[in-house]
Image (cartoon, rainbow, N blue to C red):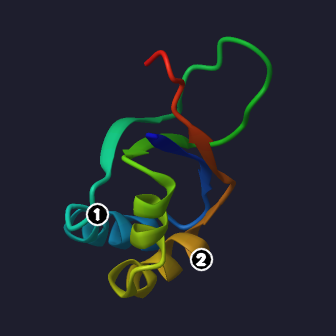
Amino acid sequence: MTVYAVALITIEDRVTYKRYQRNFGAVFEKFQGKVLAMRDKPRVVEGEWVGDKVVIMAFPSEAAFEEWRLSPEYLEIVGDRFSSTTGPVLLVDGHPWS
C-alpha cells in the first residue's frame, strides 16, 4: 500500500537547510519515492499553522520509506535538516480508493 510522508517544517537556519536541499535530490532519486507536492508558506484555509513549508512525498510501501529514511546516504545528510528545521514528519497510509 502506498504511504505518504508529510513534512510540516519551520526553517530556522536557511543556509544549512539549502545545503540539505542541494543534497536531497541525489539521495532521494536512488529510492522509490516521489515528491508529490511542496510549497513554501502554504495558504492556511482552515485552523492555524505557523510553519514555513509543506512537503508531501509518496513511497510504494512503508518498507520502501524506511529503506530510504534509514539508508546510509540519507543519514549522511539528514543532520542538516535536523539542525536547520523544526516540525513533524507524518507517515500516513494511502486511501484504498486512490
- Given residues 81 and 95, the one toward you in this image is 95
Q: Name the residue: 52% across, 81% down.
A: 79
Return the residue at label 1: 28
Q: Residue pushed farthest right?
A: 47
Q: How many marks?
A: 2
Q: On the rendered structure, is 36 left or right of 12?
A: left
Near-viewer residue (88 or 2): 2
Q: Percent from the top left, x then y, of residue 5?
A: 52, 47
Determine crowd level at label 1: few under 14, some 14-19, many 20+ residues with C-alpha closer than 10 A. some
The residue where tag 2 is placed is 83
Residue 60 is labelled as none
Which residue is painted at 69% across and 55% down in the image? Answer: 87
Callout 2, which amino acid?
Ser
Q: Toward which corner of the image does residue 37 lie, by quadrant?
A: top left
Mark nearest the camera among 2 and 1 is 1
Residue 42: x, y in percent?
53, 27
Q: Quadrant of residue 6?
A: top right
Q: Nearer the viewer, residue 76 or 41?
A: 76
Mark 1 residue type: Phe
Tell me: residue 51, above or below residue 78: above
Find residue 59 and report its horizontal and vertical position in percent.
Answer: 39, 48
Instruction: Say which residue appears at 38% left-offset and 70% top-offset.
Output: 20
In the depicted view, which residue is nearer to us: 44 or 15?
A: 44
Q: Callout 2: 10 Å neighbours few (<14), some, many (20+)?
A: few
The residue at 27%/72% (across/down) is: 23
Q: Under tag 1, what secondary structure?
A: helix
